[in-house]
């Protein structure tokens, strides 16, 4: 596997704080960079959950929540086209567009064991928490005849213990991410189940 360590822990420029992409600009990066629709859906799901969490659990305003949405939406933007340079290509793109550094650092924090960046802010910790877990929950929904409908927290925690199911999803990473926040796995799964199905 490629070494994806970014070799740095500071991103962007504080002078650009508050500068973001519009929803349209961000979605056009998504469609230009990510041909795989399943990956696009994953990124939109993480974006939706991040924004919902910012608004509902952190009581942030729309402007701040938009940053959370952007980090979620673009965190895997370079994964399909540049797997060997995953994370560094989108980071450099956002740095060259002079985007708010908090968004760039959140993207850089979504996999500390890969990118070598420890999540420190709430946005950074939550993108790490939601990334693998929302992907796992989506995989679990896809094998159910009614998809997300009627899916409960218990069925997800049970599936997490079944190591043969969605074996590519790293359970250790999920536990590591959850260990960095003061919420239970049940609360997080419940939150994802409440918001993720609204993305198509
Ligand atoms: Fe992801």
Image (cartoon, helix red, strand yellow):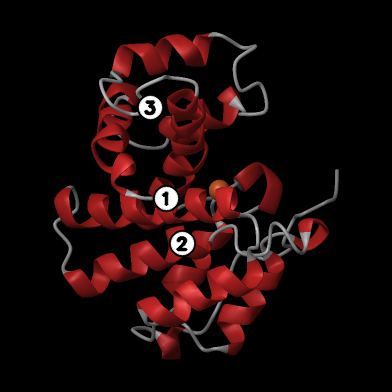
Residue pointed to by mark 3: 147
Q: Give the CA distance from mark 2 to mark 1.
A: 7 Å
Residue that appears at 60% across and 47% down:
111
Q: Which residue is mark 2?
A: 73
Where is residue 28? Give x, y as percent. Answer: 51, 77
Kindly identify the residue that appears in the image at 43 percent across and 9 percent down: 158
116 relative position to 103: left or right: right
Asked if 63 appears above or below 60 in the picture, the reply is below
Q: Is residue 13 above or below residue 63?
A: below
Residue at 74% in and 63% down: 7
State the SS at label 1.
helix
Mark 1–mark 3 distance (CA, rounded to whole Å): 18 Å
Q: Is mark 1 within 8 Å of ligand 1?
A: yes
The crowding category of the residue bearing disc 3, from other C-alpha atoms within 10 Å (few below 14, some 14 to 19, many at least 20), is: some
Rendered image: mark on residue 46: 1
Residue at the outermost front position: 145
Q: How many marks?
A: 3
The earlier-in-sequence mark between 2 and 3 is: 2
Q: Is residue 186 above or below residue 69?
A: above
Q: Taking 137 as reference, is 60 above or below it?
A: below
Q: Nearer the viewer, mark 2 or mark 3?
A: 3
For the N terminus, the quadrant is top right
């Amino acid at each position: 596997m490629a070494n994806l360590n970014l070799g740095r822990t500071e991103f962007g420029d504080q002078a650009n704080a508050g500068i973001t992409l519009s929803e349209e600009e961000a979605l056009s990066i998504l469609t230009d960079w990510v041909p795989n629709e399943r990956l696009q859906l994953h990124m939109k799901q993480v974006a939706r959950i991040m924004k919902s969490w910012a608004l509902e659990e952190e009581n942030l305003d729309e402007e701040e929540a938009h940053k959370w949405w952007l980090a979620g939406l673009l965190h895997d933007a370079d994964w399909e086209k540049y797997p060997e340079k995953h994370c560094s290509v989108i980071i450099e793109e956002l740095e060259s567009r002079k985007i708010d550094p908090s968004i760039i650092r959140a993207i850089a924090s979504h996999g500390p064991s890969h990118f070598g960046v420890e999540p420190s802010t709430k946005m950074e910790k939550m993108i790490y928490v939601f990334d693998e877990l929302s992907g796992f929950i989506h995989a679990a929904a896809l094998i159910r005849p009614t998809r997300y409908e009627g899916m409960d927290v218990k069925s997800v925690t049970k599936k997490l213990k079944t190591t043969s199911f969605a074996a590519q999803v790293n359970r250790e990473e999920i536990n590591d991410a959850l260990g960095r926040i003061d919420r239970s796995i049940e609360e997080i799964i419940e939150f994802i189940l409440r918001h993720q199905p609204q993305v198509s």
